[in-house]
Amino acid sequence: MVVVEVVVWVLAILVTAAAGVAAVLADRLGRPWLALAAPVPVAIGALMLAFGLAVPAPAHALWVILALVIAALGVVAGSPLSMFVLRRTAPPTGERLGVAGGIVIDDETTEKPREVLRGGAIIGYLERLAIVVTIVVGHPEAIAVIIAIKGLGRFSELVAPEVRERFIIGTLVSFIWAAACGGVVWLAGGTLP
């Protein structure tokens, strides 16, 4: 029976790591649909926990490795998943991406194009890491602070409606994804012997 448990846990680690690799490739290659592999192991883990089908970890080290891989997946897959959703909500003309990863809008005051929401990728990684950590350590209320910091920090750039919409949609997708990954790790921690 222990051999079966080891195989199941090693397989879970490998599948989750492969989903992480797909998410990184999705981001690097500009093909966000590749990140759709990321929710699969998280959803399977959540369903197994919800229905009491969790396979006991034969060694604590395997649980720690899987928890770290899921947490990393929560950080790296958020950006391409957000981009996947945002591309489904972009206007028919498409989005205009800037050189620094922001979006280009027509500035009404200068009548020239201006890039806003630059640095969003790095901010996204940091916010998702913070969300996963706050949930795993049992303090999800700290997410309110993360939301406040992000909203206040970006407030001046949210002048155009398309920027506000992109900011809200991207933030929600990113936060929900990180919370789901953190939640699976937290719930699985409650099943340890």
Image (cartoon, grey):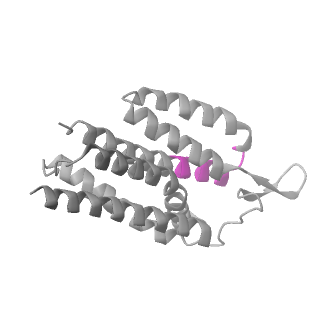
Q: What's the residue at 47%, 71% (across, down)?
A: 34
The reply, left or right, for residue 123 in relation to residue 110 is: left
Q: Is residue 20 above or below residue 184?
A: below
**157 or 186, nearer to the observer:** 186
Would you say residue 166 sits in the magenta stretch?
yes
Would you say residue 66 sits in the magenta stretch?
no
> Range of the magenta residues?
158-171
Residue 24 horizontal/vertical position (percent): 54, 64
**50 or 88, nearer to the observer:** 50
Dominant secondary structure (helix, strand or loop) of the stretch shown in magenta: helix
Q: What's the residue at 44%, 54% (across, down)?
A: 73
Q: Quadrant of the C terminus?
A: top left
**146 or 164, nearer to the observer:** 146
Residue 92 figure quarter: bottom right
Q: What's the residue at 57%, 48% (across, down)?
A: 125
Q: Quadrant of the N terminus?
A: bottom left
Q: What is the tally of numbered marks visible in this picture?
A: 0
The reply, left or right, for residue 191 in relation to residue 93 is: left
Residue 64 horizontal/vertical position (percent): 34, 44
The reply, left or right, for residue 46 in relation to residue 29 is: left
Residue 30 horizontal/vertical position (percent): 60, 71
Q: What's the residue at 44%, 40% (across, down)?
A: 132
